Amino acid sequence: MQALFRPLPLTLVPVMCVLLTLSACEKGREAPAPQQAAPDTGESAPMPAPTTKGEKPIVVASVGPYDISLMDLLKVSKTAEDRAKAVGDATVEEVRRLTRKRRLDEIIRKRLLVLGARAHPEWVTDASVTAKVKEQIKALGPAEVDRRRELAEVSEEDFVAKFTQFIREKMMFDAITRHEVTENIVITEGELKEHFDQNYETFFNRPDSWSVYQIERYAPRDDPQRLGEVMEELERIRSQVSHAIQDSATPEAKAQAMKPFVHKYNESEGGGQHFSYIYDTPAVNFDPELMSRLRSATVGELSPVFRLAGDEDRVGGCFFLAFKKVLGVHSKFEDVRKTIYGILYEKREKVLVDQMYERLRSEYPVTLHEDRLYHGIEAVDEPGS
């Protein structure tokens, strides 16, 4: 079961996307110099945020020493904003605001991971990055690299620099999640078995079930005369149904022939639906007399009219056609062990990921400038206007 933050092996990355989105994470101000000499930390070279000529960048957030400009953010959110449509009660403007905020959150999380990995320069070294870049470029092949570079309209030097920056940061993401999350997830055999035992009835045990058409009619419990009339009505209806289905060759065909009668005569809740799935389990409050009859029913045969157990206020009668039966599944621990492991893994992973980001945010404070974040959205015309 693949988990969201589990480090994944590097694959052939879409280089065009790399070149278009990497600058969204560039440094806006220099981080303090380390107190002692250390190997290359994997930090990308600082680059000025793109701005309109003569204007200062509009900073929408800061993550530790990093500033994130509005233009950086728009590079990864503008396409989605332009395609935004109203959803339910949310206007196009509200959808665009949500889209931009989500993209900013993604950038912030990536910046926090980079800052956390910087504290351990031994995790990602120049040598390891160089080796991975060579491996990826070799896999792409010279022709494909050149084609993508030309599409991006950048020099070979810029292409390699941006690609290297992407690979370095991807390795940093993987390294910190491996050290702080993956390597700290321990699930014992006892925990697996305990989860199985606690959730057996609701998760790992599927009871027998039937696909059923039934016709139920009711009368007040304190009105025996009306109950007698109800039972007579059901006998007449059953006779009509029996005649209608007698030439049907299969249980499913009989069910189709019975369907109009269910819609017309059934008084039970949900009587307008075509059929019910009825499960042989005490957890579902089916009428006990109905369940007793179903357990011994023959699929495809119309049941006799019988009296229901009813409730405090009313009683009644019923007849049914069970046209399909699905046997229950009673899972063994060995058969679902991997599934349980995946469930527990994801739970532990989420806890550790949340703790990691909480720690990183305490060490590298995040500042949002919401008064600048949505700049320009209200000025964009609504689609179709």
Image (tube, grey):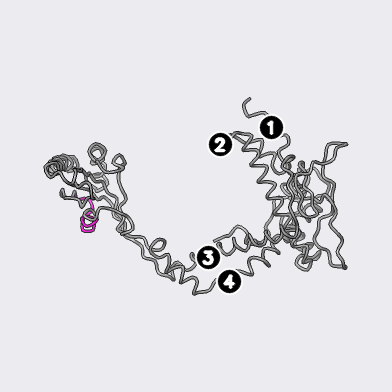
Sequence-wise, the earlier of marks 1 and 4 is 4
Distance in Å between CA atoms under marks 4 and 2: 42 Å
In this rendering, position of residue 329 left or right of residue 90: left
Q: Amino acid at mark 1?
A: Glu
Distance in Å between CA atoms under marks 2 and 1: 17 Å
Q: Which numbered disc covers residue 344?
A: 3
Residue 230: x percent and y percent? 15, 42
Is 195 drawn above or below residue 254 in the view shown? below
What are the residue bounds of the magenta stretch?
Answer: 291-301
Q: Amino acid at mark 3?
A: Leu
Q: Label 3: how many residues lie within 10 Å, few (<14), some (14-19) or many (20+)? A: some
Mark 1 element type: loop
Sequence-wise, the earlier of marks 3 and 2 is 2
Q: Which numbered disc covers residue 294?
A: none
Sequence-wise, the earlier of marks 4 and 2 is 2
The residue depicted at 76 percent of the width and 59 percent of the height is: 115
Q: Which quadrant is the N terminus positioned in?
A: bottom right
Q: Which residue matches tag 1?
A: 378
Is disc 3 in contact with disc 2, using a CB cutoff of under 8 Å? no
Residue 342: x percent and y percent? 52, 64
Q: Label 4: how many residues lie within 10 Å, few (<14), some (14-19) or many (20+)? A: few
Q: Is residue 362 visible?
A: yes
Question: Depth check: 305 or 324 in front?
Answer: 305
Q: Which quadrant is the C terminus positioned in?
A: top right
Q: Which residue matches tag 4?
A: 186
In this rendering, position of residue 191 left or right of residue 159: left
Is disc 4 in contact with disc 2, using a CB cutoff of under 8 Å? no
Q: Which residue matches tag 2?
A: 87
